[in-house]
Image (spheres, grey):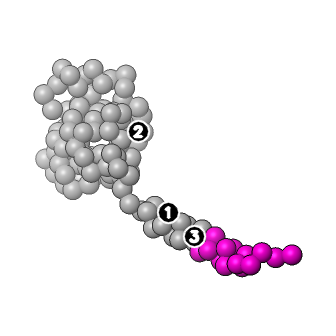
């Protein structure tokens, strides 16, 4: 035997479920609170190219990475970034990559090998540098 209003109750549950699904789906492309958009990321760059490389994150020039060592870029934007390495005194693109830079977790971009690795082991170099 059916309860009166059982059909209305099922319709209400279905409507609630659909509303919840639409709300969650519409939020998927948005920024997660506390991640992305801030300038508290740390990016370390290593390369052995003959020339110094200008490093860019999206449209922001981070600075120059000298050859043969690690260069630390503090106060880098966090979130989804396209990073580029260009010859410093020219416009030639050497390497580009897409990364997700979280706050409080430094990343190391090895330009020569086109790898992005955890930079925690080299984080101490940032305390010694001026960049």
- Identify which residue, 60 or 67, lies in the foreground: 60
Kindly identify the residue that appears in the image at 42 percent across and 39 percent down: 115
Q: Which residue is mark 2?
A: 116
Q: Is residue 7 visible?
A: yes
Is 12 within the magenta?
Answer: yes
Q: Which residue is mark 1?
A: 24
Is 111 within the magenta?
Answer: no
SS of the residue under disc 1: helix
Percent x, y of residue 113: 41, 38
SS of the residue under disc 3: helix
Asked where in the image residue 66 lies, by quadrant, the reply is top left
Query: Which one is earlier in the sequence, the residue at label 1 or at label 3?
Result: 3
Percent x, y of residue 92: 23, 53
> Label 1 to label 3, Cα distance in Å?
12 Å
Kindly identify the residue that appears in the image at 38 percent across and 46 percent down: 100
Q: Which residue is mark 3?
A: 16
Asked where in the image residue 127 lies, by quadrant, the reply is top left
Percent x, y of residue 35: 34, 46
Percent x, y of residue 90: 16, 51
Q: Quadrant of the C terminus?
A: top left
- Range drawn in magenta: 1-15
Within 10 angstroms of label 3, few (less than 14), some, or many (20 or more) residues?
A: few
Residue 128: assigned label: none
Residue extending farthest to the front is: 4
- Identify which residue, 7 or 49, lies in the foreground: 7
SS of the residue under disc 2: strand
């Amino acid at each position: 035997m059916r309860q009166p209003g059982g059909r209305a109750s099922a319709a209400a549950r279905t409507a609630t479920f659909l509303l919840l699904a639409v709300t969650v789906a519409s939020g998927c492309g948005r920024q997660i609170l506390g991640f992305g958009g801030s300038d508290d990321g740390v990016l370390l760059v290593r390369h052995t190219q003959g020339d110094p490389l200008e490093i860019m994150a999206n449209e922001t020039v981070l600075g120059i990475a000298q050859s043969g060592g690690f260069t630390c870029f503090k106060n880098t934007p966090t979130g989804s970034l396209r990073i580029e390495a260009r010859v410093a005194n020219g416009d030639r693109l050497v390497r580009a990559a897409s990364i997700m830079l979280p706050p409080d977790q430094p990343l190391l971009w090895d330009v020569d090998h086109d790898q992005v690795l955890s930079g925690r082991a080299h984080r101490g170099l940032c305390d010694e540098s001026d960049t």
